[in-house]
Amino acid sequence: MTIKSILAGTALVFALSTQAFAAKTDLTLGVALEPPHLDPTAGAAAAIDEIVYANIFEGLTRIGPNGTVEPALAESWSLSDDELVYTFNLHDGVTFHDGTSLDAGDVVFSLDRARAEDSTNAQKALFAAIDTVEAVDDLTVMVTLKQPSGSFLYNMGWGDAVIVAPETAETNKENPVGTGPFRFDSWAKGSSVSIVRNPDYWGDQVALEKAMFRFISDPAAATASLLAGDVQAFPNFPAPEAVPQFEADPRFAVVIGSTEGETILSTNNGKPPFDKLEVRQAIAHAIDRQAIIDGAMFGQGTPIGSHFAPHHPAYVELVETYPYDPERAKELLAEAGFPDGIKATIKLPPPSYARRGGEIVAAQLREVGIDLEIIPVEWAQWLDQVFKAKDYDLTIVSHTEPNDIGIYARDDYYFQYRNPEFNDVMAKLDATAGEEERYALMRQAQEILANDAVNGFMFQLAKTGIWDADIEGLWENSPVQANDLTEVRWTN
C-alpha cells in the first residue's frame, strides 16, 4: 500500500467520521398526544404548546425553564407610576416565517384578537385586564390596563398570548407561521409533526437543524421506541414502571422534575347529584391518593388537596381537609339523600395517568357506593364532549397550565363551579402587585376550593424525562406546557 493510498484512506475515514458527527443535528422526540391543531391562540390542548411554544411561536415575554418571566419579542418594557401602562420595546429586524416583518401593528392585532368578544382563545381571561393596545411607532407598543395586574407580564408569556400576523392568523391551525427559531415543516396526521431551523431567525441560531415530534400514547410502545432508538427523547415519559430499566442503562439520562400539572378527578358541579356539597365531600373522602400514585404512577407524584403546585411558595398543605375515610364517605352519601349509592360515568382521555388512575378511582368509589361506568375517549372527543359541551359526570385530567387557579372563577368553565367569595379573592389577586399580599390571597383561594371539594384533588404530576445521555438542553421541570428546543444540542 502506498503512502498516497494510506493518506487517501485516512482522509476518507476522517470525512466519514466528520459527517457522522455533523449528522447529529436532528432529534426525534416522543410525545403522548397528537394536538387537535397547531394554533396555541385557539385551543386549550397542552399538546399544541408542547410542539410550538418557543419553537415556532413567541410572545412579548416568555416563561423560562425556572418559571421566571423573560424578554422575548419585547427586548424591554417599562411600567408607569400608577402601574396601569406598560410600554413594550420590540426587537428590530424580526420577521415571520413567511418573510413579512413584525411590527407594533401585529402586537395590537394579536392582543385585540385574543380579547375580542368573538375570540376563540381558550385563555381569554388572561387579557381581561387590558383596556387598550396602541402602536406608538413601528417598534413600540403601549398597553393600558383597566386596573393594576400583578400577573400581567407572566400572562403575556403563556402560549395563548403569542404574537401572530393578520395575514396568516386564520391558517395557523394547519400551517403555523410564527417568528420563532424553528419553522413548521410537515404534519403526518396520526404520526408526527416536523419542524426545521429558521435560517432567518432574529435571535441566536439553534443547534438543531430538524426536530420531529412523534405521537406515542401507549406506554409499552413509548418504552420500545426509546430502547430501539426510534426516538431519542421522551420529555414526558408515559411509562413510569419502566423508569428503573432506563436508570440502569448508561445510554440514557433519567431526569425527574416537577410540573404545573394538578391531576384531578374533575367533577361537573352543575350536574346533579354533583351539585351537592355532601356528594363531592363523599368523593373526596373515598379517594386514596397514595394508592392512586402508587398504582397508576408507580410512586411518582405528590398528593395535593387543592388546585395548586406544591413547589410554589404560596402552597398550602390541604390533603387532610378530606382524609381517606370510606365510612365517612358512605355517611355523607346518605346525608345527601343517596343511602343506596349513585350510578355515574367517568370519561377517561388517553394519558396513562387518566386511564390507569381511572380504574383505581372507579374501584375506590365503588367501595363507598358510587358505581362508575368507565368510558375511554380520545383527546379530541374529550375536548368536544367534556371541555366544550360539559357533557360528563366525572373525568380525570392533568391541568398543566401555569398558576391556573383562576380558572375556578370562570362561570362558563367545564367544572361549572360558581362561588362569589372565590371570585372576589381572584379579583383582588389580579389587582394586587405585592408578592406577600398575592401569596396570602392564593392561600385563601386554595382553602376555599378544598373546603368546597370542587374536584377530587389527587396529585401533582411529576415530569419524568428520559433521553439519550448525549443530549443536553431539555428542561428538567415544566413551568409551562413546552418542549423548548432552543438550547438543545448533541454533545457527542
Image (cartoon, rainbow, N blue to C red):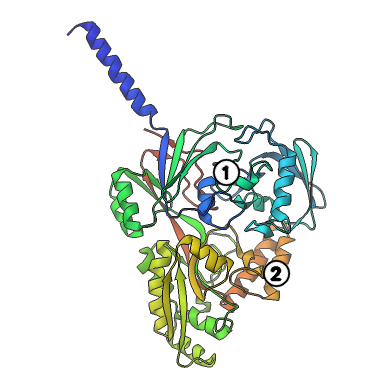
Q: Residues within 10 Å of mark 2 (few under 14, many from 20)?
A: some
Q: Which residue corresponds to the image point at 53% horizontal and 82% vertical from the top-left?
A: 281
Q: Which residue corresponds to the image point at 27% horizontal and 15% vertical from the top-left?
A: 10
Give left or right: position of 173 versus 136.
left
- Name the residue that disc number 2 marks: 425
Which image quadrant for residue 410? bottom right
In the picture as drawn, the residue positioned furthest to the left comes out as 1
Q: In terms of sequence position, does the residue under pointer 2 or pointer 1 come before the other?
A: 1
Which image quadrant for residue 2? top left
- Mark 1 is on which residue type? Pro
For mark 2, give the secondary structure: helix
- Mark 2 is on which residue type? Val
Q: Position of residue 107 (x, y in %)?
A: 71, 43
- Which residue is nearer to you in this view: 31 or 184? 184
- Which residue is nearer to you in this view: 311 or 69? 69
Q: Residues within 10 Å of mark 1 (few under 14, many from 20)?
A: many
Q: Position of residue 28 (x, y in %)?
A: 40, 42
- Which residue is nearer to you in this view: 310 or 291? 291
- Name the residue that disc number 1 marks: 176
Q: Which residue corresponds to the image point at 36% horizontal and 32% vertical from the top-left?
A: 492
For mark 1, give the secondary structure: loop
Q: Position of residue 109 (x, y in %)?
A: 73, 46
Q: Position of residue 380 (x, y in %)?
A: 50, 60
Q: Which residue corresponds to the image point at 48% horizontal and 91% vertical from the top-left?
A: 331
